[in-house]
């Protein structure tokens, strides 16, 4: 099938659906193309005990907020899927599920999309596929013997999925720490290779820490207010959990309870796994970030004259010694919680930097009519999350509307199929 649309939105998750809501509100012709089903990323890349780290009250999409009876709780993966499905039904977007876009290029004034359901052209395109596409597994994995099971965090479901023996979890971002806890609570012997990810307390001075940070405006702070926006976008998220109603993840406490903590994974040689001697520094730095957040909350409470209960500060319950090599004979499985690579090879438009990151200003690229939505730190800390994706979608909808008006003023029909005039580099999208 060959067709034309005003705007093609690629991706039917929270970002793509939010974009569709605003486009529909403004009467803009568009279609949403989703390779799988609504909520696919929440269905197939989460473990059984997964739940959101952000509280339910932060689940706010255009025209639709969390409507349950536990605003301070944390939705499970299945509940997130239901939330998104219900949201889609609430406004009936022009959604085509099971349609994969395999190629995107610009010809003249239109974009050509090759999909699993045929060809499509569009005047403008919003890429709302997020930033987590291909599991990232280091080349070191190739050195593990065949009898050791290996899974990426996106493939992990539960402890009994893995064979008997100790489990090495590599990476201490949110996924790595929560999977290590899941295995630990299931009674498995866990070795955790601890990286440089920061942590945060779940609650402080009577409230969820994220509630304080939201009130303090941290979710509204633009990435460009930092010294190096590119580096900010690469930072790992603070680890904590929403499991069991929400709690801290204290790796030192896990060590007291029997989890083996190591520094960063360095090498796999012969019959041993070797770790860097940076465990103490990594734990200290994570604690320092958590305490720095508390300092900021204390200062805010003082400035605002807020009455909040006093709370004692964190005291480390365990101090590491030297990281010893781990015999391969002790390991039955490895979980690689090492993140994801972006995969935009299907996009044949030159809008990427040397690292493959799309260059943009609040989602607006240098290619007229091409936008990104749902990227981590696209504009603020809330970008890419339920808390901030609506604001980014509304901004892009304004850009799309302005582009449409410009097309009309220049005599290019909105549904012309193949307009003939090429836009100059856009000043109107700044």
Image (tube, rainbow, N blue to C red):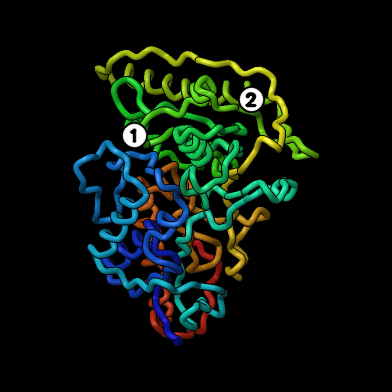
Tag 2 residue: 279
Q: Is residue 398 visible?
A: no
The answer to which quarter of the image holds residue 105 is bottom right
Distance, label 2 to label 1, CA atoms, is 28 Å
In the rendering, at what x and y percent does residue 242 appear? 37, 36
Task: Tell me: residue 327, above or below residue 358.
Answer: above
Residue drawn at x 45%, y 36% as measured from the top left = 186
SS class, disc 2: helix
Dot 2 alpha-carbon crowd within 10 angstroms: few under 14, some 14 to 19, many 20 or more: many
In the rendering, at what x and y percent does residue 165 appear? 60, 38
In the rendering, at what x and y percent does residue 339 appear? 57, 47
Residue drawn at x 50%, y 41% as measured from the top left = 175
Q: Which mark is residue 123?
A: none
Residue drawn at x 42%, y 82% as measured from the top left = 4
Q: In the image, 143: left or right of 279? A: right
Tag 1 residue: 244
Comparing 209 with 282, the one in front is 282
Residue drawn at x 44%, y 42% as measured from the top left = 381
Dot 1 alpha-carbon crowd within 10 angstroms: few under 14, some 14 to 19, many 20 or more: few
């Amino acid at each position: 099938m060959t067709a034309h649309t005003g705007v093609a939105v690629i991706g039917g998750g929270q970002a793509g659906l939010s974009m569709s809501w605003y486009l529909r509100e403004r009467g803009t012709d568009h279609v949403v193309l989703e390779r799988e089903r609504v909520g696919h990323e929440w269905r197939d890349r989460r473990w059984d005990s997964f739940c959101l780290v952000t509280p339910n009250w932060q689940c706010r999409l255009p025209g639709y907020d969390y409507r349950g009876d536990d605003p301070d709780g944390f939705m499970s993966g299945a509940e997130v899927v239901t939330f998104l499905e219900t949201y889609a039904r609430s406004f009936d977007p022009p959604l085509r599920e099971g349609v994969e876009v395999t190629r995107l290029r610009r010809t003249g004034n239109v974009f050509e999309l090759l999909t699993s359901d045929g060809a499509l052209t569009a005047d403008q395109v919003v890429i709302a596929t997020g930033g987590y596409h291909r599991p990232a597994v280091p080349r070191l994995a190739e050195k593990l013997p065949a009898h050791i099971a290996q899974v990426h965090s996106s493939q992990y479901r539960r402890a009994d999925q893995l064979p008997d023996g100790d489990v090495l979890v590599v990476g201490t971002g949110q996924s790595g720490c929560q999977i290590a806890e899941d295995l630990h609570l299931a009674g498995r012997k866990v070795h955790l290779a601890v990286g440089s990810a920061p942590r945060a307390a779940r609650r402080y001075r009577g409230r969820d820490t994220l509630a304080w940070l939201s009130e303090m405006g941290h979710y509204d702070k633009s990435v460009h207010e930092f010294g190096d926006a590119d580096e900010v976008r690469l930072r790992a998220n603070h680890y904590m959990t929403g499991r069991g109603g929400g709690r801290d993840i204290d790796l030192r406490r896990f060590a007291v309870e029997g989890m083996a903590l190591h520094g960063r994974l360095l090498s796999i040689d012969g019959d041993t796994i070797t770790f860097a001697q940076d465990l103490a520094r990594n734990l200290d730095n994570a604690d320092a970030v958590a305490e720095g957040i508390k300092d900021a909350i204390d200062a805010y409470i003082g400035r605002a004259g807020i009455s909040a209960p006093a709370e004692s500060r964190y005291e480390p319950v365990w101090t590491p010694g030297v990281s010893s090599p781990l015999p391969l004979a002790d390991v039955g499985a490895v979980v690689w919680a090492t993140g994801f690579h972006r995969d935009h090879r299907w996009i044949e438009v030159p809008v990427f930097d040397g690292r493959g990151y799309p260059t943009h200003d609040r989602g607006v690229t240098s290619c007229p009519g091409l936008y990104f939505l749902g990227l981590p730190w696209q504009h603020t800390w809330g970008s890419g999350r339920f808390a901030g994706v609506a604001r980014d979608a509304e901004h892009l909808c304004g850009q799309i509307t302005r582009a449409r008006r410009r097309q009309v003023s220049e005599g290019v029909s909105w549904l012309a199929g193949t307009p003939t005039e090429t836009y100059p580099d856009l000043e109107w999208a700044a």
